[in-house]
């Protein structure tokens, strides 16, 4: 009894903590191991990788796999376009979603129920691939950069997430700003938007990952425009070529790589790391906003 009081934890609590830590450790290992394995293969000599047995560290370290990647002209262009569409799509998506969320959160906006219902319907009802393709074609967005941004500019899910956050803010903030002579846009830009950092950080992650990983829209609308290709689309072509050997240009490139001791498997692993690392670098900068609120102490009643 005395030992339990001094240590502050009983044996049952210690056993429970041990089980929790063990489960968390297993989840971490299961989650991280595939990424470390891909990284190890991408950094390992291609000829040696054929033997198998690579775990989480390379047996024969080399940078050749990454150096050979950038001999593909399409990958460089794809990286630039993917980065540009990620930045533009995220910023414009945040702006449009937050403005619409602010509008339908206003009690004095008489059409809020209609707009909210209309937005909710888009989450469950879709026109389908062919009508969307015909619409994009009729709008003249084929073979253009706009097709990466405009069709997905407003997401109902993002709007409702931001609106729920705005509804949790004290309405007295907007009332006090009105008393000081602020108009609606000033309230949105100077009062509401700075307080939306946690919600905007979360939505920006969704938007950035979606834009960075997108390739199907490139295939549908910009497949005949090499200057508008994306990194994921080029990766898809490389993977398709290594398994079926369809694309002539990529097939010749990979054949030349094989003669230079770079295997298609190592190429796939290296490209996977190149595609994954940039988006992973975003997490440390926005993770803190997932938990911390921005309105604590803003208004006290």
Image (cartoon, rainbow, N blue to C red):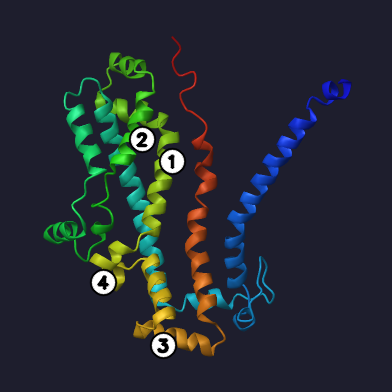
Q: Please, which residue is most extreme toward the front here?
A: 12
> Residue shown at 70%/45% (left/top)?
22
Q: Is residue 155 left or right of residue 291?
A: left
Q: Secondary structure at mark 1?
A: helix
Q: Which residue is mark 1?
A: 202
Mark 2 surroundings: few (<14), some (14-19) or many (≥20) residues within 10 A: some
Residue 193, horizontal then vertical, whole percent: 36, 31
Q: Of tags 1 and 2, which is closer to the observer? A: 2
Q: Nearer the viewer, residue 33 or 257?
A: 33
Q: Nearer the viewer, residue 145 or 237?
A: 237
Give the Cα separation between the discs numbered 3 and 4.
Answer: 21 Å
Mark 4 surroundings: few (<14), some (14-19) or many (≥20) residues within 10 A: few
Q: Secondary structure at mark 4?
A: loop
Give the Cα separation between the discs numbered 3 and 1.
Answer: 42 Å
Q: Secondary structure at mark 3?
A: helix
Give the Cα separation between the discs numbered 1 and 4.
Answer: 33 Å
Q: Do the numbered discs 4 and 2 sit on residues whose CB atoms are within 8 Å? A: no
Task: Identify whether 246 is placed above or below 230.
Answer: below
Residue 291, horizontal then vertical, whole percent: 52, 33
Q: Do the numbered discs 2 and 3 sit on residues whose CB atoms are within 8 Å? A: no
Q: Which residue is mark 3?
A: 252
Residue 196, horizontal then vertical, whole percent: 40, 32
> Residue shown at 49%/75% (left/top)?
69
Dot 1 or dot 4: first in sequence order is 1
Give the Cα separation between the discs numbered 1 and 2.
Answer: 9 Å
Q: Which residue is mark 2?
A: 161
Q: Do the numbered discs 1 and 2 sit on residues whose CB atoms are within 8 Å? A: yes
């Amino acid at each position: 009894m005395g030992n339990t009081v001094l240590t502050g934890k009983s044996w049952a609590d210690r056993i429970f903590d041990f089980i929790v830590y063990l489960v968390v450790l297993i989840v971490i290992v299961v989650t991280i191991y595939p990424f470390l394995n891909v990284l190890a293969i991408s950094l390992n000599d291609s000829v040696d990788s054929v033997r198998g047995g690579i775990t989480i560290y390379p047996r024969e370290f080399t940078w050749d796999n990454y150096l050979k990647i950038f001999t593909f002209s399409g990958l460089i262009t794809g990286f630039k376009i993917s980065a540009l569409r990620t930045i533009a799509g995220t910023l414009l998506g945040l702006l449009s979603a937050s403005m619409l969320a602010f509008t339908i959160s206003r009690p004095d906006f008489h059409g809020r129920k209609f707009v909210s219902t209309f937005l909710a319907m888009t989450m469950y009802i879709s026109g389908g691939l062919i009508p969307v393709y015909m619409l994009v074609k009729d709008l003249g967005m084929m073979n253009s950069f706009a097709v990466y941004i405009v069709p997905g500019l407003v997401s109902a899910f993002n709007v409702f997430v931001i609106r729920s956050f705005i509804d949790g803010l004290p309405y007295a903030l907007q009332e006090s700003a009105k008393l000081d002579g602020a108009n609606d846009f000033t309230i949105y830009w100077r009062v509401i938007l700075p307080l939306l950092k946690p919600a905007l950080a979360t939505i920006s992650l969704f938007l950035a990952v979606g834009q960075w990983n997108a390739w199907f829209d490139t295939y549908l609308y910009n497949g005949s425009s090499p200057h508008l290709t994306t990194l994921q689309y080029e990766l898809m072509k490389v993977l398709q070529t290594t398994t079926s050997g369809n694309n002539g240009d990529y097939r010749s490139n990979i054949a030349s790589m094989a003669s230079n001791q770079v295997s298609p498997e190592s190429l796939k692993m290296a490209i996977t790391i190149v595609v994954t690392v940039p988006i992973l670098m975003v997490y440390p900068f926005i993770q803190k906003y997932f938990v911390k609120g921005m309105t604590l102490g803003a208004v006290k009643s």
